[in-house]
Amino acid sequence: MRLSTRLYRRLVKLYPAGFRESYSGPLEQQFREDYAEARGSAARAALWLRTLADFARSMPAQAAHELAQDSRYAFRTWRRHPLHTTFAIAVLAIAIGANTGIFSVLNAVLLRSLPFHEPERLARLQAFLPPGGPPDAARFHQWRTQSTYLSDSARYVTGEVSLEGDRGVSRTRLTEVSSNFFALFGREPIAGRGFAPGEDAPGGPGIAVISHGLWRRLFALDPRAVGASIRLNGTPLTIVGVAPPNFDYPQKTDIWTPTAFDYPRVPKTYIAFYFATARLRPGVTWAQANSAFEAEAYALLPHLRKAADSRNRPALVPLSEELAGPIRAASLLLMTGVGLLLLLACANVANFFLARALSRADELRVRTALGASRARLAQQLLTEAVLLSFIAAVLGLAVAHWTTIVAMTYQPVQSISQAYTIFDWRVLCFAIAAATATGLLFGAGPALYISRADLALGSRASTAGRRHSNARAILVGTQVAVAVVLLTGSLGLGRTFRALLHTDNGYELRSLATMTVSFAGTGYMSDERWRVYYDDVVRTVRAVPDVLSVSATGALPLAIEAYQGAMFTLDGSGPTTFTSTIAITPDYLRTMGVRLLAGRDLTADDLTSGEAVAVVNEQLARAFGEPSTVIGRSLTATVGRPRRIVGVVTGMRDGGPTSRAHPQAFLPARSMRSLTIVAKVKGDAASRIAVIRDAVAGVDAKIPVFDVKTMDQRLDDTLARPRFYMTSVVFFGGLALLLSIAGVYGVVSYACGERIREMGIRLALGSTPGRLRGRLLVRTLITVGLGAIAGITAAAASASQLQHLIKGAEQHTFATSALAVLGTILVASAATWIATQRVARLDVTDVLRGN
Amino acid sequence: MSNTNRSKPEDLLPLPAPVFHILLSLAEGERHGYALKREIAARTGGTLRLGPGVLYGSIAKMIDQGLIEESDDRPDPHLDDERRRYYRVTAFGRKVGHAEAARMRDLVRLAAAKFGTREPA
């Protein structure tokens, strides 16, 4: 055959099946005749051009025509099977929707670029801060301008402060920066100005840049905000600029001030931790910059070499990694889980399509005899599949949208620019791609079967039947395997989570109402005055009905962001232990529900007497010996006077159930910048917390009361992300189980229908319905068992991944897998038994006569 | 799926140029595809050269609409290639052809009145 004819035949293959089947012969013939007429290469080139134009003109019309025909046919079919169709659409909508939703999370934290100039060259400086700390701004600026590998670097310190406004005091995040902060990110304020060089020197002007969000909340976007005055922790500042809308680095900052080197300028209640961000010099690679940074850090601070942990070693961490950090691995894992679920849904719907294709075999035989080609039927099945998955995808967008809302609540992002949304071109493309792939995936099997199967009129080859039942068995086995993986995961996570809920944290939860007051910028910051205020608070709150005791601390468990601490020894010698020191008022330990192991609690006298005393926790005491033996001995730090140990208490898990209690020393509160008040209530604290808050606020209206929560709520907040992951995986597992039940049921009941005659004969020959059903059950269980083995293997291999979702997730155990398999086998058996009920009701004479 | 037309001739108007030309050619008698193509090219002075896709696409659609049908009659095998398919116009096709011609005639009359050109005889 000539090359040109072969090429044209290829082209013809691109026409939709119906048209191609009817006209490929005449099309080719005409092309050959045209080609024969065209003499010379110019004429032939012209012919090819005309042919291609002809194809481009006629193909879309034919495709649209057959698509409309196939769609009409699909809708008619669906109307005949409304239950099956609804089930398939619902399953696919959930699967595609959940995939799209989780993808939107991945898209937001991993794919979407940060709203900075050349964000891929921005880094956080880890474990080493450049020279020039407060108040030495000049030295820092000298360092950054002379760096050989960084083009710029900025310092900052961030924390929450009280912002006084017309509607009372609110808490906002303040970030104190070096003057070049906005320039480093390449994002200058959209109104007003940024900070000028030199404005970050101590004693500089009291100015601030506010976020776009704060501009809207506080000033309703009024341009006169620039020049207006605000008070932060009592310090007046003039607004000089408004940041761009999606700029809120770091940690959703609302106010920036150029006071990174002027620590006392804004009075603070938090411990200031300095951070630095930098931009790589053009042409410098990450590897080069990292080794230069490391060398510089080691030269200045040689002891850093000893850092064992990779997180304590000097490094330049890409900012995108820093921002995605904690949710990156978890999101990828959830994506895998939800991807498996989609695969399962595809297998399920493919099975259902295949079953229907088989039950339509007779109709298809008739249509084949009438001239409908197999390719045409396969095309129609594929069209139906893709159409079904697109409908599911559209409905799935609602599921996806809901997923993003849930994820936004339980897995919050560090910047508004990372907000999860499905209204993003990548997410929408993903949804379309997922729908197409899904449709092709579950449509291809049945379509392939139709195009290969022996559909000649009257044929009913048993080998073909066996082949098809094998194909369906593989689909069911796959479903079982995926279901076992997801079930094992959800059982493991569910058990871990339940264990978290039942962990003894070392303090009470339900009966404790807590709230924080800040003395920053008020006259109460001096040593003695806060105590006058505090005594009033205690008196007022005690008067609230059902309040059993009131106390306060400088660092409440589940609310601690940073520790203050030191290396301590016992009696000035022996081993040293890093110990966090926590300032408390009398009665705190009892109020929290901490158990006293030896000695006594701190008393009111300890606050006023000159003696330095401390209560230590079990973890610290054990570092030195038995709890009872440390009483009366002295706790000595490198600085400060020794403290006499008067009591030992049980440890508290400050970070909640996933954390561990570590050495702590409780000291009588002296000079306090803020206090967290804890009130123990008879019964549930939630019912009394509002009254207690009002009582505290009533003591002095100028002292802001914020972060009002029961300990139960704090635990909920702490467990929000683990709960979200656990719920997601359990949901995937449950759905997987449901789908595999449907899969098993479908296959078995089809097999029953197909072999009804054989069974009738067997019954006539003396077999019993029970025996027949038993045989079917055994066959199903072999398939299920093979799938389960594959599932257990995959679950064991992937078990360590669960650690990414919940810290401390239990290691894969055989028991968990066994439970998952047992569950799957039980429901598969039940599904089989129900599906084979018709065998028990079989009337032998009817069956035999019927055939 | 073919010959299921229940529409009135007017519903199909105006006809695409290839469809009308195919009707014109078949009005004279049965033709196979290639003959149709050549005849139409000759009639239009080479301005309407139907490629295979458009030609058979039009034929498929016309069969669907009931304008034409495949003919079972074959000429003497010595005279022709028996693999060729022959088409003939249906009664409905004739009606549609007439209706399209009438529509064109009315249009030409209107143009004559508006532009003052001479009406064809």
Image: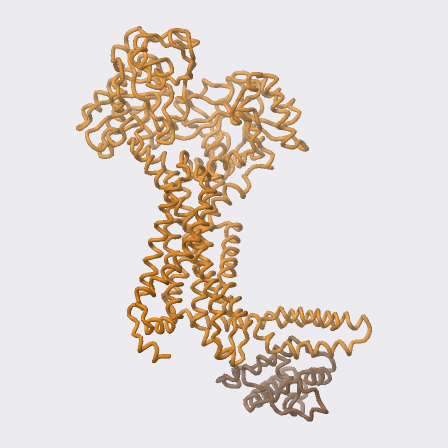
Residue B45 image offset from top left, x and y in percent: 74, 82
Task: Name the residue nearer the viewer: A494 or A424.
Answer: A494
Identify the hue of chain B.
brown
Is A139 on the left or on the right of A657, as rendered? right
Q: Quadrant of the C terminus of chain A?
A: bottom left
Residue A369 image offset from top left, x and y in percent: 52, 80
Task: Name the residue nearer the viewer: A828 or A127.
Answer: A828
Is A691 on the left or on the right of A96, as rendered? left
Does A604 sit above or below residue A283? above
* Residue shown at 57% from the left, 83% from the top: B63
* Residue shown at 64% from the left, 25% from the top: A292
Task: Name the residue nearer the viewer: B21 or A168.
Answer: B21
Task: Name the residue nearer the viewer: A784 or A735.
Answer: A784
Number of callouts in the render? Answer: 0
Is A794 on the left or on the right of A661, as rendered? right
Q: Quadrant of residue B26?
A: bottom right
- The answer, for residue A222, to whether it is visible in the render is no
Does A796 sit above or below residue A79? above
Q: Quadrant of the N terminus of chain A?
A: bottom right
Identify by letter the chain in orange: A
Residue B52 image offset from top left, x and y in percent: 67, 76
Residue A79 image offset from top left, x and y in percent: 39, 70
Which residue sits furthest right? Answer: A40
* Residue shown at 41% from the left, 12% from the top: A568
- The answer, for residue A389, to whether it is visible in the render is yes
